[in-house]
Image: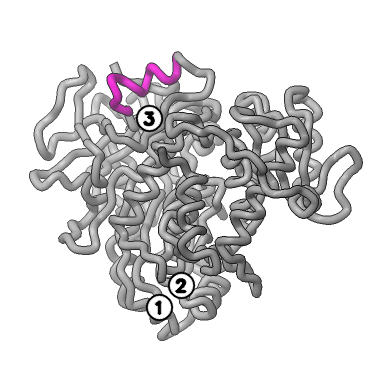
Amino acid sequence: MLTLPSLLNKTVEKIPEQSALVFNEHKIEYGLLIESARRLAQGLKDMGFSKGDPIAIMLPNVPHFCTSYYGILELGAIAVPINIMYNMNDIQHHIHDSGAKAIIAWVGYKDQVLSAVAACPECRTIIFLGSKIPAQTYPLTQIIASSKPLSQPVDIQPSDIAVINYTSGVANVPLGAEFTHEALIANATTYRDMFRISQEEKLLAVLPLFHPLGQTLVMNAAFTVGATVVLLPVFSPEAIIETIQKNSVTFLAAVPSMFKKLLELQIEIPETPSLKLCINYGGALPEEILEKFESKFNTLVLQAYGLTEAGPLVTANRINRDRKKDSAGLPLVGVELQIRDTENQQLRPKQNGQIWVKGPGIMKQFHNRPDETKKILQDGWLFTGDIGFLDEDHYLYIRERKEDIILKAGFEIYPGEIEQILLEHPAVSEAAVIGVPDTAQGFEVKAFLVLKPEETATSQEIDEYCKQFLPVYKSPRIIEFCTSLPKSPTGRILKKVLRSRAGYEKNNTQPI
């Protein structure tokens, strides 16, 4: 019976001296990683924690994230990763909603963590990584150093809940998606095999490990085969290039904004010959940028699509199959896709509809939210909340999130189409389009634009430009220039925040 800890143990038995993690100048072998995890598991047990207890982790991409994650799992407890950019209220929600009995956090977040835990009596223990920790809290490194490795293996079943990953994709408040060991293993091994991740690979962890993509596509996939994870705590284009060069990184998973920043680096021929494969997640990468990136860095970029509730990948382009323009690729091995109308009837190829997914890696349920679970899980199928279509070859094309579609005077408008036109304007760096209420037509089209450095543009210029390529009813009537757009940890533009900024937030729509 395989679980995440047992898979890691198998790797350790084969190659204990192989580097599991690289962090700055430090290399941590697989043998040391599993020993540290087992010591933490015993330390947590000695503190009174046991199988099934939720324990939160709020750490950046450092070795102790991996140690904490697997130490919690070794105990049979449940890991609850928390976004390191969250404020006190967000942290409080995650702790209270998950029922976390303890939190492991970097001491740099102590003010937010202490304030959040003060309002959560169920969280009785705070463990900090770092020096000068507050009174009444515990030092993570000391717990690991002073504890013996877990003396008695915990009986963990593949069907046990291993991780609760939070998402706000289908609700107005973050919901905890529960994942079993077998679901996480299905995802990790599928990614490993599909992207041909071998023991020799070196994967760059620049996407946050608190996000399921960083956890599963990078950390867990690497650990199942004995590859090396190179940790980078903060995104910096220069640091990425330096890290790839220094460590001969072969695999990079990133989001569109990261690829764009790397492409903007003033380097004619970057010395990154080791980089073989890149995965783009969190939004479509414009074809022009993809082609320029591949040419400049002499690598292959595969578009992928997914969502937290699905593990997270649903589709991806293949190394050995044709890539189709604007497509998010083919379903992963073992994953089924259907496009349905609002009456749950399956649609034919090239018909837009609601995207449903089924597979071994999707979440079990939302933690303590049966009503929300029923809205998106039906007979083993997960409603993604996205609109798209499949072509005759089963390639997926994403049109829009259902909640982002603009209904103007009876016409459905897909913001993505308008955003693509806006991004082709020479002065525009980033674009986001939403619908705002309009008394005459129901909704009007509004665009938020971030201009490139040293570039200028007026609303009138943008309006005239759009009308060259779009029907009048699709062209943005309202244009707002801003210095930045709100984004998720994976770089996805948060349109809920933009709608709130515009004084409007749609009610979340659900399938019939």
Identify the residue shown where x is 78% and y is 25%.
119
Q: Give the range drawn in magenta.
A: 371-382
Q: Determine whether 32 is above or below 333 in the image.
A: below
The reply to whether the C-beta atoms of the residues labelled 1 and 2 are less than 8 Å apart is yes
Tag 2: amino acid = Val
In whole angstroms, how far apart are the C-alphas of marks 2 and 3?
38 Å
Disc 2 crowd rating (10 Å Cα; few below 14, some 14-19, many 20+) is many
Direction from residue 320 to residue 424 in the image, left or right: right
Q: Residue 274 carries which label?
A: 1
Answer whether residue 464 is visible to the viewer in this image.
no
Q: Residue 249 carries which label?
A: 2
Q: Name the residue under label 3.
A: 403
Tag 1: amino acid = Ser
Judged from the image, the secondary structure of the residue bearing numbered disc 2 is loop
Q: Where is residue 287 in the image (x, y as percent from the top left)?
A: 28, 62
Disc 3 crowd rating (10 Å Cα; few below 14, some 14-19, many 20+) is many
Q: Position of residue 470 (x, y in %)?
A: 24, 47
Identify the residue shown where x is 46% and y is 38%.
495
In whole angstroms, how far apart are the C-alphas of marks 1 and 2?
6 Å
